[in-house]
């Protein structure tokens, strides 16, 4: 029998049998897809479950802020917690050094106070944007709460990942700085993915590929535009026919506009991170919680396999906050009433092309 | 802002972090980059000499100006190079960059000639060697300043220059690094690459933007002249927490050197993100004039200290002018006896109306 069909309704079946046939860290999604967690529970919720197995995720960096590193760290750490094989490529001379900065899962759930303050509920509250209050009451859709088999972990960015997880044999690191062509990287990816073929049977284990700052200027291949594009295309096809997820981050400001567009189209799921200006009085007036924000995350495209129905998000811009400087949290933006007639360009002046569109 | 830059460079890198890197960017419209570079150089070097910095020495890689210029410059600033021989070394890529000359007269012991500018890895090695020779090996740090990255980009490709700079930044003995760039000499991508590699970007812009067609106009001469001595200095800091700090100052060129002053006028730096709000709280000029012309009802007349002239809204302004003189006299004579205190119920209340105000209630 094929894997059990899942329906996206509020009536949920007890999935204990279905989950057992999948390895740890995997979850069934709609239309026969399987999800792996991105390492950020909020991002999993936004994307409708996580990163789909077989998809290529691309993250557009902002040259002025290192937020893409936060996403990569959580992604890689989540994979190591579930003992999923990992291939990490970066332009540094010694990529292994980055593994030392991976976060560890948070100690206990009591630390983070996400429950609403009980005192508040006594008085009458008029909610300006009522939808944001619904999230507090939603049940966690992860079925099982067992510590080991938890699908997605909250990571504590101040605590480094345990040594034995970093030294595991399933981690492969590649430096892309010196190779003049991308054939070495391509071969390593091919070898890695050949261990994770996709069959019709149950999936025992999924792999993760993380490529950081792919077109960084100090890499020898950074001006070989067509080679980079064809590498991405071949990686996408290899990932599609295997049980893995690949995340590539790149700084779009260093690419020609046409190449940047081509890369964006290549991506199955496309995210971008943006820096936020410090002490910006206008932004502080416009957004609540501005003081805690470190950046913005935009979701441009979300992959949907085996269906023609696209995923349309209510909001595509989220603020990145570090709760207690430890936990990465993504929140919807709350803002003042906006003139609806202004259409898609919310009062953008041409000179500030770095800030981009804020879509509430 | 210039102070904050110098402070950031002076403080250098924390353990395990990349060294702070500054790009000084200018263009033909505001060509003060070299002066700003000199300013930052002398500030950093004096802090190194004074022992205020974890960096123990400074390596200056000079491409666009002769090393003797820099020795003169430091002498003029009151920093004697002779006694500070052990703190600064200049890598001379100006006199014989491609190794064409057979022999060169040695200028001083602080200057080392470099002859192979086409090879970035050899340049890297020379810089590190010179630095180690200056401060010793181990964990002792030194700072680097590169006269002009433009010259480097003439000889080598963007990616090799980028590799040199990023390797310098990640070297454990380097405390801070800064370089100068003339942005209009290169394609936009090159500037983007250098900004990507730096943690602070200082750019110089003219105080008054001139449209290209206006260059020859006599009226704009004053502006052009102003631009030749003054400009705006913008800095973008990439902070550790991922936020970007944007600051601005005005810069003035004087005989004695360069001067930084805070911005005199309000400038809207970041307008991009603020969407239009439904409520327009600002008044345009026409609206302001109209507002001043509105005659206020009873209770607000006399607010601005003018003598009280009662206008009860019944008659038009023209007619009541004759009435006013009478009214004023009456008012003065009445002031002894009593006052009329009137609280208006609503603005659209018709005076002496016979209608029942409760009529429009819809129950």
Image (spheres, coloured by chain):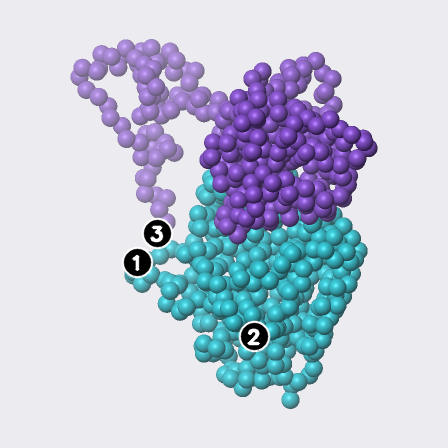
Chain colours: A cyan, B purple
Secondary structure of the residue carrying tag 2 is loop
Q: Is residue A11 above or below residue B149?
A: below
Crowding near the residue tagged with mark 3, few <14, some 14–19, many ≥20 C-alpha atoms within 10 Å: few
Q: Is residue A125 above or below residue B76?
A: below
Residue under the image location 64 percent in, 43 percent down: B129
Q: Chain of mark 1?
A: A
Secondary structure of the residue carrying tag 1 is loop
Q: Is residue A291 visible?
A: yes
Q: Is residue A240 visible?
A: no
Please state if B281 lies on the left or on the right of A201 as rendered.
Answer: left
Please state if A229 lies on the left or on the right of A321 as rendered.
Answer: right
| Image location (x, y in percent) of residue A270 | 64, 59
| Image location (x, y in percent) of residue A94 | 62, 59
The residue to which callout 2 is attached is A83
Residue under the image location 66 percent in, 85 percent down: A201
Checking the image for residue B363, the label placed there is 3
Q: Quick one: label 1 or label 2, which is nearer the N terminus?
A: 2
Q: Chain of mark 3?
A: B
Crowding near the residue tagged with mark 2, few <14, some 14–19, many ≥20 C-alpha atoms within 10 Å: many
Residue under the image location 42 percent in, 20 percent down: B316
The residue to which callout 1 is attached is A123
| Image location (x, y in percent) of residue A121 | 32, 61
Which one is closest to the eye, mark 1 or mark 3?
Answer: 1
């Amino acid at each position: 029998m094929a894997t059990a069909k899942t329906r996206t309704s509020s009536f949920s079946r007890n999935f204990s049998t279905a989950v057992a046939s999948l390895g740890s860290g995997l979850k069934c999604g709609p239309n026969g897809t399987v999800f792996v967690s991105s390492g950020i529970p909020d991002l999993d919720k936004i994307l409708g479950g996580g990163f789909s197995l077989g998809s290529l995720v691309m993250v557009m960096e902002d040259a002025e802020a290192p937020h893409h590193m936060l996403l990569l760290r959580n992604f890689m750490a989540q994979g190591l917690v579930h003992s999923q094989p990992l291939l990490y490529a970066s332009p540094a001379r010694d990529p292994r050094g980055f593994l030392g900065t991976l976060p560890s899962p948070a100690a206990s759930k009591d630390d983070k106070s996400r429950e609403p303050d009980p005192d508040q509920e006594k008085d009458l509250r008029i909610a300006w944007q009522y939808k944001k209050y619904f999230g507090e009451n939603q049940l966690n859709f992860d079925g099982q709460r067992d510590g080991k088999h938890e699908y997605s972990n909250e990571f504590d960015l101040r605590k480094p990942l345990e040594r034995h997880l970093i030294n595991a044999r399933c981690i492969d690191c590649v430096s892309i700085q010196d190779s003049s062509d991308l054939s070495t990287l391509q071969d390593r990816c091919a070898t890695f993915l050949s261990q994770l073929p996709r069959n019709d049977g149950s999936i025992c284990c999924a792999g993760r590929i993380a490529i950081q700052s792919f077109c960084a200027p100090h890499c020898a291949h950074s001006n070989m535009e067509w080679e980079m594009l064809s590498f991405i295309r071949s990686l996408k096809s290899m990932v599609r026919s295997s049980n893995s997820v690949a995340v590539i981050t790149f700084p779009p400001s260093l690419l020609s506009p046409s190449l940047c567009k081509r890369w964006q189209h290549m991506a199955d799921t496309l995210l971008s991170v943006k820096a936020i200006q410090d002490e910006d009085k206008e932004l502080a007036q416009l957004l609540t919680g501005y003081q805690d924000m470190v950046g913005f995350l935009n979701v441009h495209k979300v992959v949907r396999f085996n269906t023609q129905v696209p995923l349309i998000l209510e909001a595509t811009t989220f603020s990145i906050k570090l709760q207690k400087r430890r936990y990465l949290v993504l929140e919807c933006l709350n803002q003042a009433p906006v003139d609806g007639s202004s259409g898609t360009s919310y009062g953008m002046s041409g000179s500030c092309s770095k800030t981009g569109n804020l879509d509430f | 802002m210039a102070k904050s830059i110098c402070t950031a460079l002076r403080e250098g890198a924390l353990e395990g972090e990349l060294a702070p890197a500054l790009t000084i960017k200018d263009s033909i419209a505001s060509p003060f980059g070299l002066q700003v570079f000199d300013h930052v150089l002398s500030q950093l070097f004096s802090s190194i000499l004074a022992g205020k910095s974890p960096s123990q020495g400074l390596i200056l890689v000079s491409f666009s100006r002769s090393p003797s210029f820099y020795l003169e410059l430091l002498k003029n600033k009151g920093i004697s190079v002779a006694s500070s021989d052990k703190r600064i070394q200049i890598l001379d890529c100006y006199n014989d960059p491609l190794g064409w000359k057979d022999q060169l007269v040695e200028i001083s012991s602080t200057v080392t000639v470099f002859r192979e500018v086409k090879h970035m890895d050899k340049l890297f090695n020379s810089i590190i060697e010179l630095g180690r020779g200056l401060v010793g090996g181990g964990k002792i740090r030194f700072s680097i300043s590169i006269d002009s990255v433009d010259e480097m980009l003439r000889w080598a490709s963007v990616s090799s220059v980028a590799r040199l700079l990023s390797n310098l930044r990640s070297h454990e003995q380097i405390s801070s690094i800064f370089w100068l760039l003339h942005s209009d000499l290169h394609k936009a991508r090159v500037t983007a690459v250098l900004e990507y590699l730096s943690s602070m970007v200082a750019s110089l812009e003219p105080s008054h933007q001139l449209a290209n067609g206006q260059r020859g106009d006599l009226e704009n001469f004053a502006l052009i002249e102003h631009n030749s001595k003054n400009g705006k200095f913008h800095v973008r800091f990439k902070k550790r927490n991922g936020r970007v700090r944007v600051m601005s100052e005005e810069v003035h060129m004087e005989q004695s050197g360069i001067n930084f002053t805070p911005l005199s006028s309000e400038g809207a730096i970041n307008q991009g993100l603020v969407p239009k709000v439904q409520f327009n709280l600002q008044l345009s000029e026409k609206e302001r004039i109209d507002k001043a012309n509105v005659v206020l009802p009873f209770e607000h007349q006399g607010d601005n200290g003018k003598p009280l002239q009662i206008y009860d809204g019944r008659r038009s302004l023209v007619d009541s002018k004759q009435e006013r003189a009478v009214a004023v006299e009456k008012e003065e004579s009445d002031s002894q006896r009593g006052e009329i205190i009137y609280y208006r119920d609503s603005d659209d209340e018709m005076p002496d109306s016979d209608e029942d105000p409760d009529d429009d209630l819809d129950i």
